[in-house]
Amino acid sequence: MTSETVGVDPDYAELARPGESRNDPAVMRNSLGRWLATVLDPGAEPEVTSVDVPAANGMSNETVLFDATWTEDGHRTEHRLVARIAPRASTTPIFPSYDLDQQFQVMRAVAAHTSVPIPRVYWSETSPDALGGEFFVMERLDGEVPPDVMPYTFGSWLSEASAADRSRLQQSSVRVLGELHAMTEPHRACPNLVPGGTEPTGVEALRAHVEEQRRYYEWVIADGPRSPLIERGFDWIEANLPADAGPAVLCWGDSRIGNMMYRDFEPAAVLDWEMAALGPRELDLGWMIFQHRFFEDLAAMAGLPGMPDFLRRDEVSDTYLQLTGHRPTDLDFYTLYAALRHAVIMFRVQSRAVAFGQAELPANPDEMILHRATLEAMLDGTYWASIASGGIE
């Protein structure tokens, strides 16, 4: 990280979240009650008893927690639920589109075909009429989530846990990826993820993934500056695509521990499937490794000890091999690709902040990438050696 970014508020998940995107709980309660009456059996008489719009809502989907009761099989039953709602266009969303029904279908397929813990999904609503955007409803579970704000490496229930408990969480989190990647015929289980409906090879799926990320970048910079660093990164990716990427598996996409809910340091729910895709299994492994490094580098910038012995690249690779029999390959490529993908997202986040008057456009657009120095070091081939020597931290 450069010294210029040290003063950046690490509360990056709160950047550029306009107040108008949040929903009034009283209005939401009435809207949800009316909508439930349309999807439940006649005579269910649904009642929404409470609604909570969390202050720490996500940067993409809106999350609404609610409790409801209705009559089924002659009995009044209580249900703890979550609605995930696509953002309004007026909020300048992070991504160009939000296919909530696809997320719903992927979660249902993962629950049906793997042992990955998925909350029960109830309904998918593709009309925006009820809540102002398409949405789906799933059950609400209890557990602990490693925080993004402040990052769990800054001090949290996870950083303060025993070494044995952190190791247990790490191992069980990698196991989730192995269980997901073991899904048979993912192109059939998740046909919406496969253009044309044919099963791609790992290389074909990877190339399609990179092309989609390029389209996303072009969308991000359509009305603003370009990023020389991001474009350098895409050039590197194109020049270093693995010749053999193995089979195309179902990838979670946003495979980070902050998207898991834990009980007793074991995953109780795997959430946020909007980035799911077919691809090499290393897509998920690289993302999980990099996302921890992102928070670890932020901790180092803040002069904090962080969690340097957690989710280390070699340990994640060895654990995955032990659990699945597959030795991850080309992790230099996949961790750099993860850093590049995250750079595009961060560029969009900061562009939103500029648009909402929360930040000024820097003279060098690359300064809008919070982990600029990390990506530069990866492209220069010095990052991982620096980690080993303690240079970054």
Image: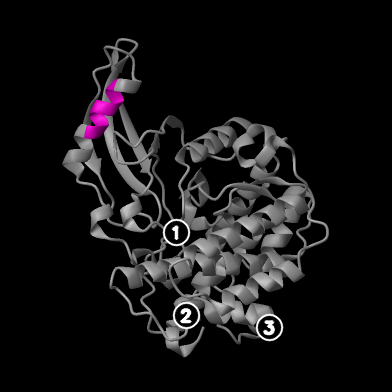
User: Which element is circle 1 on?
Assistant: loop
CA distance for labels 2 and 1: 31 Å
Q: Residue at point 68% right, 83% down?
A: 380
> Which sits earlier in the primary sequence, circle 2 or circle 3?
2
User: Which residue is under mark 2?
Assistant: 365
Which of disc 1 and disc 3 is earlier in sequence? 1
Indicate the secondary structure of the residue bearing disc 3: helix
Q: Amino acid at mark 2?
A: Pro
Q: Mark 2, mark 1: which one is toward the viewer?
A: 2
Residue occupying the far top of the picture = 74
- Pointer 3: residues within 10 angstroms few (<14), some, or many (20+)? few
Residue 311 against residue 298 in the figure, above or below:
above
What's under tag 3, amino acid-wise?
Asp
Quadrant (top left/top right/bottom left/bottom right) for the C terminus: bottom right
Residue at 63%, 82% in the rendered image: 377
- Foreground mark, 3 or 1, reads 3
- For the residues labelled 3 and 1, the Cα–Cα distance comes to 31 Å
Residue positioned 57% across, 59% down in the render: 215
- The mark closer to the camera, 2 or 3, is 2
Give the residue at mark 1: 146
Q: Which residue is mark 3?
A: 380
